[in-house]
Image: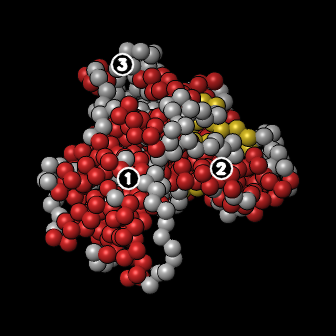
């Protein structure tokens, strides 16, 4: 354990770097509350999405890293801002007219348009909990409504009342002139309508702990700032929450940097050190535009998980969080294959390399073995060549390539076969464009077929290539079950036909035979698909029967 901790303390993996920042807060003494608190925030005016997953997954990685370098207990709170007033009706929910009637009510008072829970907030909170539970996250759920009404925030709210002027000094310069005239950090919950009101604070009574405001009908009303009678505007609310709970670490999107700076100032005004903050870059769509829930651009979490396992999404989230990443369908196969490459590499790595390996952080150190005997990108090309409509077709080839593998012994491989068929039919198949070979390509493909049919022809191609390259090494044994031998045939044919660069030869194979401009290591593809099947595929392509 000492060796592991020492290595973790020196590791340059970003979760350990973040964990060390948190540990510095308690270099002199452990926290009075008895634990280090990590927090993620959730706005339940919408359903959980890929950003929610990323934030909880990344925060969990930092929390686990912290637990390796410190004996201080930790907690992760997933905080739902469910006391916010409903300002607009989401476009992706039913009962739109009913929702319009409930505008400005706290989300936990808005009727559930789905009819399954006591409120829209409760519905989305349940979705959040189910969502987080399904991925095995360890967390405590926190509801703003419950925290405000139970009095958990009362002390901090009274402190905010006392520091009203300082909070206003922080907030007003960030607002337009018209907004400055009506702004108050306190949003009273109307005892008449239940609405969360955005109205000025007219009077403050520090001894009584109350504010006075004016209802829309002109009546002046005095309410306590405690007990759930008011809610803070979200930036003061964020800073107040940090102060009240003693939050030690929180991450957020780059677009919230100005808000986090204001909330940090407010947290200090309330007498507490703000948490260690980490801002991550935003996700972009294929065109480089920021992903927006309202626009519906980019890739949703549900879409990713239709075509790949959640571990591949965690891998994508781990990679360079400070770098903007394009999040669209084409990134899925690469993420899946890189994730499994890291799984396979992990057992042979030394401790330093293991701590820098993304799979250590994805799995909290309990790293499973990969059972992917065939790369995902290869499965896609297999689906393309075989026009697979179900995973049983895929297993017909996988079983010949890896006789010891079955759906029962290799569940990850089985799931990947299912995902590959879906991905192929939804994204690859509609985009397939075959072309006829040119004269050079035609001659090379004919020679490739001949070499796949005859060991003598294959060895002749390899010998010719060796002579051209000045290579006097002995010829390999002709083994059509060996993907390296098959690859050497393909390589030799390309060299002998003068393809320069050689990648043009492989590109030609993909475009003529698979209808795509890129593909797998072709020797491996032949081994998986079958020599006879590959011969038939090339002959169909040359006969113009694939387009």
> Which residue is rendered at x = 25% and y = 49% of the image?
536
Residue 438 figure quarter: bottom left
Q: Secondary structure at mark 2?
A: helix
Query: Reading the chain from its start, which is encountered first: label 3 or label 1?
Result: 3
Q: Secondary structure at mark 1?
A: helix
Q: Secondary structure at mark 3?
A: loop
> Which residue is rendered at x = 35% and y = 34% of the image?
393
Find disc 3 in the rendering and name its residue. 114
- Residues under labels 2 and 1: Cα distance? 34 Å
**Few, some or many C-alpha atoms within 10 Å of disc 2 (few <14, some 14-19, many ≥20)?**
many
Q: Position of residue 510 (x, y in %)?
A: 28, 58
| Observer-nearest of 541 and 248 | 541
Residue 453 visible in the displayed image: yes
> Which residue is rendered at x = 48% and y = 70% of the image?
475
| Observer-nearest of 335 and 343 | 343
- Residues under labels 3 and 1: Cα distance? 51 Å
């Amino acid at each position: 354990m000492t060796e592991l901790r020492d290595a973790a303390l020196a590791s340059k993996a970003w979760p350990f770097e973040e964990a060390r920042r948190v540990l510095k807060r308690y270099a002199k003494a452990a926290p009075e509350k008895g634990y280090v608190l990590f927090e993620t925030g959730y706005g339940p005016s919408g359903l959980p999405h890929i950003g929610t997953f990323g934030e909880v997954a990344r925060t969990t990685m930092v929390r686990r890293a912290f637990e390796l370098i410190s004996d201080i207990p930790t907690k992760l709170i997933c905080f739902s801002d469910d006391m916010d007033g409903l300002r607009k009706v989401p476009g992706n929910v039913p009962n739109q007219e009913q929702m319009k009637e409930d505008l400005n009510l706290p989300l936990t008072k808005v009727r559930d348009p789905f009819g399954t829970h006591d409120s829209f907030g409760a519905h989305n909170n349940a979705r959040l909990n189910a969502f987080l539970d399904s991925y095995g996250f360890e967390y405590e759920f926190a509801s703003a409504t419950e925290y405000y009404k139970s009095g958990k925030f009362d002390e901090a709210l009274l402190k905010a009342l006392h520091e009203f002027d300082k909070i206003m000094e922080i907030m007003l310069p960030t607002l337009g002139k018209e907004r400055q005239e009506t702004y108050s950090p306190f949003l009273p919950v109307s005892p008449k309508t239940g609405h969360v009101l955005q109205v000025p604070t007219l009077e403050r009574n520090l001894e009584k702990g109350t504010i006075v405001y004016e209802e829309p009908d002109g009546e002046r009303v005095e309410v306590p700032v405690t007990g759930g009678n008011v809610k803070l505007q979200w930036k003061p609310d964020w800073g107040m929450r940090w102060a009240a709970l003693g939050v030690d670490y929180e991450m957020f999107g780059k677009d919230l940097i100005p808000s986090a700076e204001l909330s940090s100032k407010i947290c200090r005004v309330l007498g507490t050190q703000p948490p260690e903050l980490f801002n991550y870059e935003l996700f972009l769509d294929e065109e480089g535009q920021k992903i927006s829930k309202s626009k519906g651009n980019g890739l949703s979490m549900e879409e990713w998980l239709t075509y790949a396992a959640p571990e591949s999404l965690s891998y994508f989230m781990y990679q360079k969080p400070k770098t903007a990443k394009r999040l669209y369908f084409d990134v899925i196969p690469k993420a899946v294959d890189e994730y499994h490459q890291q799984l396979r590499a992990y057992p042979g790595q030394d401790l330093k390399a293991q701590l820098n390996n993304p799979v250590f952080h994805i799995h909290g150190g309990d790293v499973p073995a990969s059972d992917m005997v065939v790369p995902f990108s290869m499965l896609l090309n297999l689906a393309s060549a075989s026009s697979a409509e179900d995973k049983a077709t895929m297993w017909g080839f996988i079983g010949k390539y890896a006789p010891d593998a079955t759906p029962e012994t290799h569940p990850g491989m089985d799931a990947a076969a299912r995902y590959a068929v879906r991905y192929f039919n939804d994204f690859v198949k509609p985009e397939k464009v075959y072309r006829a070979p040119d004269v050079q390509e035609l001659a090379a493909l004919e020679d490739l077929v001949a070499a796949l049919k005859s060991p003598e022809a294959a060895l002749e191609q390899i010998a010719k290539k060796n002579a051209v390259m000045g290579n006097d090494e002995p010829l390999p044994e002709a083994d059509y079950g060996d993907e390296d031998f098959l690859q050497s045939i393909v390589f030799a044919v390309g060299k002998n036909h003068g393809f320069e660069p050689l990648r043009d030869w492989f590109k030609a194979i993909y475009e003529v035979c698979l209808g795509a401009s890129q593909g797998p290591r072709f020797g491996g593809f032949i081994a998986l698909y079958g020599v006879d099947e590959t011969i038939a595929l090339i002959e169909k392509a040359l006969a113009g029967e694939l387009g």
